[in-house]
Amino acid sequence: MKKRFLFVTLIVSLTALFLAACGNAEGSGSSNSNNTSSENANASSEDSATVKVDGSSTVFPIMEAVAEEYMIENPNAKVNIGVSGTGGGFEKFIAGETHISNASRPIEKEEKAALKESGIAFTEFKVALDGLSIVVNQENDWVDKLTVEQLKKMWSEKGGVKTWSDLNKEWPDKEIKFFSPGADSGTFDYFSEVVLGEEQIRKDATLSEDDNVLVQGVTGSKHGIGYFGYAYYAENKDQLRAIPIVNSDGKPVLPTMETIQSGEYNPFSRPLFIYVKNDALKNEMVYNFMEYTLKNAGEMAEAVGYVAMTDNAYEDALNKIKELASK
């Protein structure tokens, strides 16, 4: 799927460059004012014909897959999917720069207030389920499970943990390398809320909004540990090892599609969201893309390593956008 999408993107880009070059050559004798007017009109037309989506890197694989297939089935459609993190995506959503915002956490009170102040009405939709995965290097053969309390001690600035032996005397006396999503990430927010509470993440952790950077960090460090969405773990199982987390029943549980959907993998099972501006649904282009997303999100979620919602949940969501568009 991804190769086909990259090929299509390359062809479109080369075609655009060719046409731009031709346009510059043919228009060399025209007046500047006419060129500027025409360019502005074309830019405005292109801008209004693009569905703009931004936000969570965790939700990105789902929406990328949806957009990829949607544009293949609808060659005249254009969908831009950005990755600014959940918080960064909401900032653009509030500023009126996007139609849809991807999020790996629910919208916060302050963000709701900012949208209200900007006069933007919106609706939340759950598109899939995720299991935030705690991962180590494949060569790590000493950690068999972790509790939330141990994770807090490890990741907190005040925890006092520098080596694996600080956590368990039977583990290696080797310095731990920490890799975390960036502060604009909803995954960072979720982990902080569930694990750290009021405490701050340790200052020596490597933070990145790009989950692939985190994957590379852990795979490149025998004594590394990191966390991110289940899809990134599933895609890199040959290089990473997920750690069973002791759940509320005292049972060590690995993240799998079954344990995530059942909620057994707690407290790290969580829903993934998209937020759409209600007025944008009156735009046929945005409405069609949202409809396609909700019809295919479950299949695409599982294709990239997440867990689908129930069929009834997607059906309810489709009815909701029809209702919003008709108002």
Image (cartoon, rainbow, N blue to C red):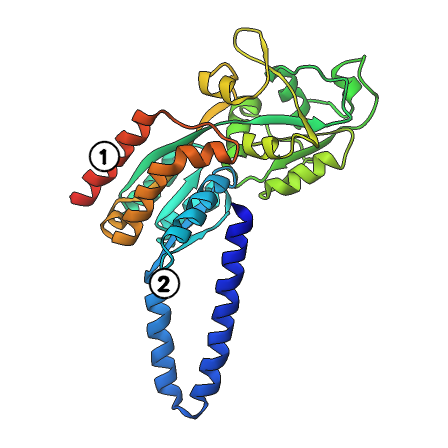
Classed neighbour count for the residue bearing mark 2: other residues with Cα under 10 Å, few (<14), some (14–19), many (≥20): few
Residue 137 disc label: none
Q: CA distance from mark 1 to mark 2?
A: 28 Å
Residue 274, percent from left and from top: 38, 39
**Residue identified by numbered label 2:** 47
Classed neighbour count for the residue bearing mark 1: other residues with Cα under 10 Å, few (<14), some (14–19), many (≥20): few
Q: Is residue 117 visible?
A: yes
Residue 175, percent from left and from top: 80, 28
The C terminus lies in which quarter of the figure? top left
Residue at x 51% of width, y 32% of height? 189
Q: In the displayed structure, would residue 53 be above or below residue 8?
A: above
* Left or right, residue 66 beside residue 182: left
Dot 1 amino acid type:
Asn
Dot 2 amino acid type:
Asp
Element at badge 2? Answer: helix
Residue at x 42% of width, y 28% of height? 308
Q: In the displayed structure, would residue 3 be above or below residue 138?
A: below
Q: Nearer the viewer, residue 120 or 324?
A: 324
Residue at x 25% of width, y 53% of height? 283
Element at badge 1? Answer: helix
* Left or right, residue 102 beside residue 319: right
**Residue identified by numbered label 1:** 319
